[in-house]
């Protein structure tokens, strides 16, 4: 199958309900891609088990993530949306890539060092070869474009190294070059408790983040408690320098309303944070409430949600399996039938 230059692949781990940071930084940017690219989006439950997961929690969080993606605007009729474990080509190609990738390449992966921590010997082998599975996720669809954040660029470079080595070793021009897809400036949302740290689902304090399924009261309380400094809002962007919490709250309102930082400050500069936080909370509630309502509706009918994911897996499998089978033929595996 010839590569398509318009095919996008991206995956997201089922690690709990997405935060406002996940939504503004990634998921929201995927929605318009459905009109301009052939989009394949995947809940990467195989990646999730590279660290221990409670089975019941994993199943629950997988459905929650799928429901959240649809509620945020990913339309299973306009894109392919599925669960990674439902398309076996991912693991079949990943094993081939385990044998193509070099130990030295994996040793340079900084994300493994970060996640494994000081006790690297206790980390799972799956966590170590995680980048090879990520390469298989993309290349089993011959996808050429991947929306990535800064923390994934190194993995994308490795995926291209694997593709090039496979092509060289087997004397073919089979796997395409993958390009990072840059779509405007993604909003970088920081913790509500510490403006120097990224908003994260792993933060032990739920007060540090807005979850996209938070209700009106939860959002209002979290914004009211959000850390600020004693000075009023500045009237220009230069005045945000050295004020990470102020910059974060201004940035959130700008991202939600479509304004620039300068535009937000024109309206609110010189005011105290009390009034500003009320405006911010109301804007967040207005934007997120339809997403929360739709997500809850989807989760109330898990059978229908699962059926939609199975249909997505069938569509994904129709693309992935022939590419995987051709890679296996090139390696020298005999066909099953």
Image: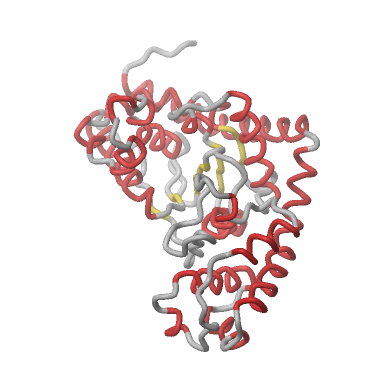
The answer to whether residue 36 of the structure is visible from this angle is: no
Count the numbered circles shown. 0
Identity of the residue drawn at 28% across and 41% down: 109
Outermost residue toward the left?
104
* Closer-to-camera residue (162/128): 128
Instruction: Decide: is 36 above or below 242.
Output: above
Query: Residue 260: horizontal and vertical position, in percent?
Result: 55, 79
Instruction: Decide: is 28 above or below 329.
Output: below
Determine which quarter of the picture holds residue 125.
top left
Query: Residue 122: horizontal and vertical position, in percent?
Result: 33, 25
* Closer-to-camera residue (246/285): 246
Identity of the residue drawn at 28% across and 32% down: 166
User: With 65 as the anchor, is 234 left or right in this view?
Assistant: left
Question: Image quadrant for the N terminus?
Answer: top left
The answer to whether residue 47 of the structure is visible from this angle is: yes
Identity of the residue drawn at 36% across and 15% down: 333
* Closer-to-camera residue (197/108): 197
User: With 261 as the anchor, is 75 left or right in this view?
Assistant: right
Give the colour scheme shown.
Answer: secondary structure
* Closer-to-camera residue (2/15): 15
């Amino acid at each position: 199958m010839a590569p398509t230059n318009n095919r996008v692949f991206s995956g997201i781990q089922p690690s709990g309900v997405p935060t406002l940071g996940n939504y503004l930084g990634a998921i929201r940017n995927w929605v318009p891609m459905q009109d301009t690219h052939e989009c394949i989006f995947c809940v990467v439950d195989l990646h999730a088990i590279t660290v221990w997961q409670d089975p019941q929690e994993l199943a629950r969080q997988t459905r929650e993530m799928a429901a959240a993606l649809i509620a945020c605007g990913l339309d299973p009729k306009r894109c392919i949306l599925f669960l990674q474990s439902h398309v076996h080509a991912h693991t079949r190609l990943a094993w081939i890539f385990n044998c193509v990738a070099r130990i030295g390449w994996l040793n340079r992966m900084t994300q493994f060092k970060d996640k494994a921590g000081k006790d690297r010997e206790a980390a799972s082998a799956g966590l170590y070869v995680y980048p090879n599975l990520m390469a298989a996720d993309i290349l089993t669809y011959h996808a050429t474009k991947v929306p990535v954040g800064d923390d994934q660029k190194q993995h994308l470079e490795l995926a291209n190294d694997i593709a090039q080595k496979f092509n060289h070793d087997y004397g073919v021009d089979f796997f395409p070059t993958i390009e990072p897809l840059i779509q405007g400036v993604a909003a970088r949302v920081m913790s509500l408790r510490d403006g120097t740290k990224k908003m994260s689902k792993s933060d032990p304090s739920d007060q540090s983040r807005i979850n996209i399924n938070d209700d009106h009261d939860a959002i209002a309380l979290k914004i009211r408690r959000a850390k600020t400094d004693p000075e009023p809002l500045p009237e220009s962007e230069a005045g945000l320098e050295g004020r990470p919490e102020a910059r974060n709250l201004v940035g959130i309102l700008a991202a939600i309303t479509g304004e620039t930082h300068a535009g937000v400050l024109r309206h609110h500069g010189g005011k105290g944070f009390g009034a500003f936080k009320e405006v911010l909370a109301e804007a967040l509630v207005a934007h997120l409430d339809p997403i929360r309502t739709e997500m809850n509706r989807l989760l109330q009918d898990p059978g229908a949600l699962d059926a939609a994911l199975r249909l997505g897996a069938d569509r994904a499998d129709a693309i992935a399996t022939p590419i995987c089978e051709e890679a296996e033929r090139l390696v020298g595996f005999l066909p099953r039938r």
